Image (cartoon, rainbow, N blue to C red):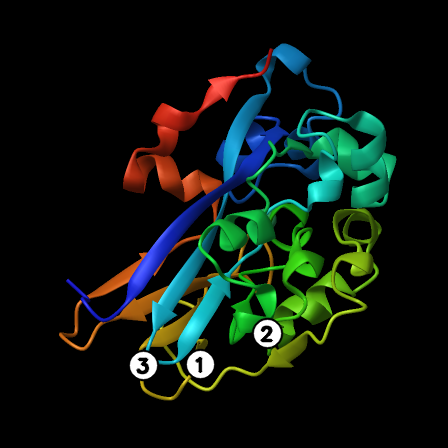
Amino acid sequence: MMAEIKIHVFHTGEACVAPDLPFGGEHCSTIKASGAFAKKSERLWLPVSAYLIECSHGKIIFDCGWHRNMSPDGVFDKKAQIKSLGSLPLYVTNQGRIEKGLAIDEQLAALGIHPADLDLVLLSHLDCDHTNGLNLVADAKQILVSKDELLFAENKTPVNRIRYNADWWRSTKMQTFDWNGTEGLAGKSYDVFGDESLVMVNIPGHSKGLCALKITGSDGRFILLLRRWRLRPKIVGAADHIRHCR
Ligand SMILES: [Zn+2]
């Protein structure tokens, strides 16, 4: 399948969240999802992933995982995380850790790829576990996120002021794209290269501009990279990777 497209799956650390964040459903309250009042023992460590896609259009990254500055020494580091995330409330909601060698640039280097060799970075959405590591690959030729997502992230609601930190992308060359197609249930999609090989499909709910990435080979077969934990256990059996916090 898709002999001409190679997809590398990178495990870029883990995030510790309340069960209601990934599994509470679309209408779960922000307070419950934040886990601010939940027992620490009930929290889950979930994998944070990113992808490298090698195709005729070059080398493309889909999401970036955690920045090395979340775990400068490769272990859980509260102080470093609060600084990287930009606020204590976001740290309370989303803790992370990333072992040495697992940051996106470190894994690319192991494959002999320098960030400047990347043709494009696509961001599914702007949450910390997808965008926090963007600065590690900021030398990529192009960085794109949906316009709806950037507008949502910058809408200045009390929740989004905590949820999103513009420091993750402000100093990069990140640009936005407008929908140019109608794929998906929301009827909003973006055909990245105009040949349907890579299509960002809007799956709003978790965030307004959230996109799944549909990758189609020349034989017409496709895979869909979804970026929401709550969909994964049912779809790809990721429950095997879920374990409780210490
Ligand atoms: Zn998210």
Residue 90 shows in the view: yes
User: x%, y% of residue 34?
Assistant: 69, 33
Q: Residue furthest front?
A: 112
User: x%, y% of residue 82?
Assistant: 83, 36
Q: Is residue 27 above or below residue 136?
A: above
Task: Judge the density around disc 1: few (<14), some (14-19), many (≥20) Cα neighbours within 10 Å.
Answer: some
Q: How far apart in space, not on screen, are marks 3 and 1 (Cα)?
A: 8 Å
User: x%, y% of residue 117?
Assistant: 53, 71
Q: Residue at x 54, y 57 (%)?
A: 63
Label 2 sits on residue: 144
Q: Residue at x 61, y 34 (%)?
A: 100
- Three-letter code for the amino acid on which mark 1 is drawn: Val
- Three-letter code for the amino acid on which mark 3 is drawn: Glu
Q: Is residue 107 above or below residue 77?
A: below
Quick one: 221 or 73, which is closer to the camera? 73
CB of mark 1 within 8 Å of CB of mark 2?
yes
Of labels 1 and 2, earlier in sequence is 2
Label 1 sits on residue: 192
Which quarter of the picture shows residue 12?
Answer: top right
- Three-letter code for the amino acid on which mark 2 is drawn: Leu
Quick one: 58 or 242, which is closer to the camera? 58
Q: Secondary structure at mark 2?
A: strand
The disc placed on residue 196 is 3
Q: Residue at x 63, y 72 (%)?
A: 148
The disc placed on residue 94 is none
Q: How far apart in space, not on screen, are marks 2 and 3 (Cα)?
A: 17 Å
Q: Is residue 169 shown left or right of residue 219?
A: right
Q: Secondary structure at mark 3?
A: loop
Q: Is mark 2 within 8 Å of ligand 1?
A: no
The C terminus, quarter of image: top right
